[in-house]
Image: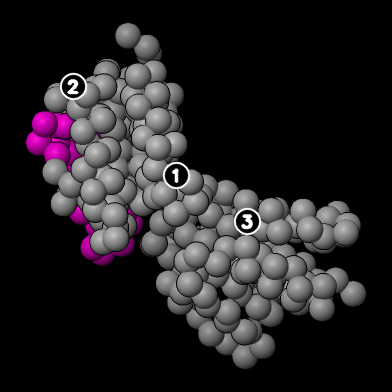
Amino acid sequence: MNGWIRVAGLGPGDESLVTDPVRAALDQATDVIGYIPYVARVAPRPGLTLHASDNRVELDRAAHALRLAREGGHVVIVSSGDPGVFAMASALFEALEAEPDPDAHDIAILPGITAMLAAAAAAGAPLGHDFAAINLSDNLKPWDMVERRLRLAAQADFAMAFYNPRSKSRPHQFTRTLEVLREECGPDRLITFARAVTTPEQALRTVTLAEATPEMADMRTVVLVGNSATRRVGRWVYTPRRAE
């Protein structure tokens, strides 16, 4: 008999932000699968097997979950934030395409609070109007595609949220990101760096593009860029809902 698969978002870091449906799924799980630091957030207990793996094996993880579910396992695939935002939900459905009867599997996606929304809430409301979310990593897509999407979103005057802005292996790409933003948005546009949001290490910094430097971001940082109407009010940053 088949078991089931739940793809669960663990939220941005604060355990109080994990939803009740996600907690219930983890309580019922026989197996938890995910990237090493996300699986580490799940407490071990009798009857639960934790399967932690590296961050570039998403399809292997998904195929493993499908195998365990076919054997009767209750499998939770964990992602940080929301599993549908640059995370494991898409990988599971890609693996499901190889199954002879995709609808035979009991699958549910359990949403979570994604990092860009937690970062926006900490800053105020910089995503209060239309916005674009862009993953700046080129692990799964070429950099020219990243740069083209970045430039077009800036030209369309979207507020923007950037995931995976800068890693040790590709620090030059965020340097290029800032260059493109200055070209398209000018030096006065507001940019917020939200690091380790909702954790005790949380740090927020809002500057103009002229003041921004690549070193202000790392892989634990979500970067939020306002549109042309985004402004400060006291210590807050917000984007008006009315187009100007």
User: Image point 74% across, 68% down: which residue?
Assistant: 66
In the picture, the disc for residue 91 is 3
Q: SS of the residue at dot 1? A: loop
According to the picture, the residue beneath numbered tag 2 turns out to be: 186
Question: Mark 3 packing: few (<14 Cα in 10 Å), some, or many (20+)?
Answer: some
- Which residue occupies the extreme top position in the image? 244
Between the residue at mark 3 and the residue at mark 1, the CA separation in whole angstroms equals 18 Å
- Kindly indicate whether the residue at mark 2 contacts the one at mark 3 (C-beta within 8 angstroms): no
Between the residue at mark 1 and the residue at mark 2, the CA separation in whole angstroms equals 26 Å
- Kindly indicate whether the residue at mark 2 contacts the one at mark 1 (C-beta within 8 angstroms): no
> Of callouts 1 and 2, which one flags the residue occurring earlier in the amino acid sequence?
1
In the picture, the disc for residue 109 is none
Question: Does residue 219 appear left or right of residue 25 in this picture?
Answer: left
User: Image point 37% across, 12% down: which residue?
Assistant: 243
Identify the magenta region: 191-212
Which image quadrant: the N terminus?
Answer: bottom right
Say what amino acid the circle numbered 1 marks: Pro
- Which residue occupies the extreme left position in the image? 211
Question: Does residue 79 appear left or right of residue 200 in this picture?
Answer: right
- Kindly indicate whether the residue at mark 1 contacts the one at mark 3 (C-beta within 8 angstroms): no
Say what amino acid the circle numbered 2 marks: Gly
Between the residue at mark 3 and the residue at mark 2, the CA separation in whole angstroms equals 37 Å
Question: Does residue 7 appear left or right of residue 173 in this picture?
Answer: right
According to the picture, the residue beneath numbered tag 1 turns out to be: 142
> Of callouts 3 and 1, which one flags the residue occurring earlier in the amino acid sequence?
3
Observer-side mark, 3 or 1, equals: 1
Residue 150, given in percent of the width and then of the height, sits at: 37, 32
Residue 175 lies in the magenta stretch: no
Question: Mark 2 packing: few (<14 Cα in 10 Å), some, or many (20+)?
Answer: some
Observer-side mark, 1 or 2, equals: 1
142 or 159, which is in the foreground? 142
Say what amino acid the circle numbered 3 marks: Ala
